[in-house]
Amino acid sequence: MRSKLKLKNFKFLQRYTWAYSPVTFFLIFLVYAWALQGLQVDFKLLKNSWPYIIDFVTRLFPPNLEVLDIAIKALIETVQMSLWGTTLGAIFSLPIAIASARNIAPLWLQWLANLLQNAVRSVPSIILGLIFVAATGLGAPAGTLALSIYTIGYLAKFYQQAIEAVDPRSIEFLQIAGASRLQIAQYGILPQVLPLGLGYTLWMFEYNIRAASVLGVVGAGGIGFQLKSYIDGFEYTKATTMMLVLLIVVTIIDAFSSQLRKRLDSM
């Protein structure tokens, strides 16, 4: 076992010699130096800003538990938004991913599907929230629609990568047997990508709970709407209660979905 591992590592080092060459490290250093120069970070200002940071953080405590019932109600709405937004996004992501995969789609269709993915990903979630708030008004429906579109941009790419990573021999056997593109996708690709795709979907559901809280800033419902209201009113201890409730639920969902992803990986 150890000899196989050493052989595998040796082959990796042989294949990617450029990755650990001095020239590569020097180029990486130049890129980071260029990025730091562009940021124009004032380290003296950062050093003197600590008292203000500490003052703000101390205003957040202790949490005001009088709004716990409001926090739970808003959090339930946030989870509902994330559930429906992720589900709708996943449904529409699958055909886009199939259309953009190099191993099954024609070149012209790949180009169009990838252009669509890039267009969706280039629109920030807050802008999507503003668009749907203007269309449907304030509340959870706008947030749900924004999350569904936002999800398409990422899950379609994840699904595409999973499809392109399938064993090419299964596709070749179906092509030789005269299977159509739809049959190849249904019988040759879907069974292989399903565990990985479900894992990606669970991860996106977790992420959308956090994204839904951000969308509340523009009035798209959920716990973010209450959070922004309390911060705007300088009711920081109430805002802390909202954040703590969100933290607890996100942690529970993360633990649950991690166990579920482990089972999917073992399939």
Image: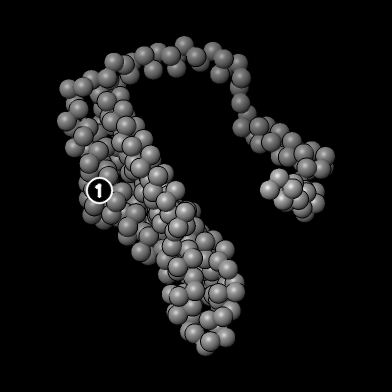
Q: Residue at x 73, y 40 (%)?
A: 28
Q: Residue at x 30, y 24 (%)?
A: 240
Residue 141 horizontal side relative to residue 6, left or right? left
The amino acid pointed to by label 1 is Gln
Q: Residue furthest front?
A: 1
Judge whether 234 appears above or below 27 on screen.
Answer: above
Colouring:
one colour
Q: Residue at x 22, y 43 (%)?
A: 77
Q: Residue furthest right?
A: 22
Report the residue marked by disc 1.
80
Q: Residue furthest bottom?
A: 178
Q: Position of residue 40 (x, y in %)?
A: 63, 29
Closest to the observer: 255 or 241? 255
Quarter occupied by residue 228: top left
Q: Is residue 124 visible?
A: no
Closest to the observer: 125 or 86? 86
Quarter occupied by residue 34: top right
Indicate the quadrant containing the C terminus: top left, top right, bottom left or bottom right.
bottom left
Q: Residue at x 40, y 13 (%)?
A: 55
| Mark 1 element type | helix
Q: Position of residue 252 (x, y in %)?
A: 33, 37
Mark 1 neighbour class, 10 Å CA radius: few under 14, some 14 to 19, many 20 or more: some
Q: Is residue 166 visible?
A: yes
Quarter occupied by residue 23: top right
Q: Position of residue 81 (x, y in %)?
A: 27, 49
Total labels: the figure holds 1
Judge whether 58 appears above or below 206 on screen.
Answer: above
Residue 75 horizontal side relative to residue 172, left or right? left
Q: Position of residue 227 (x, y in %)?
A: 28, 32
Judge whether 178 appears above or below 17 on screen.
Answer: below
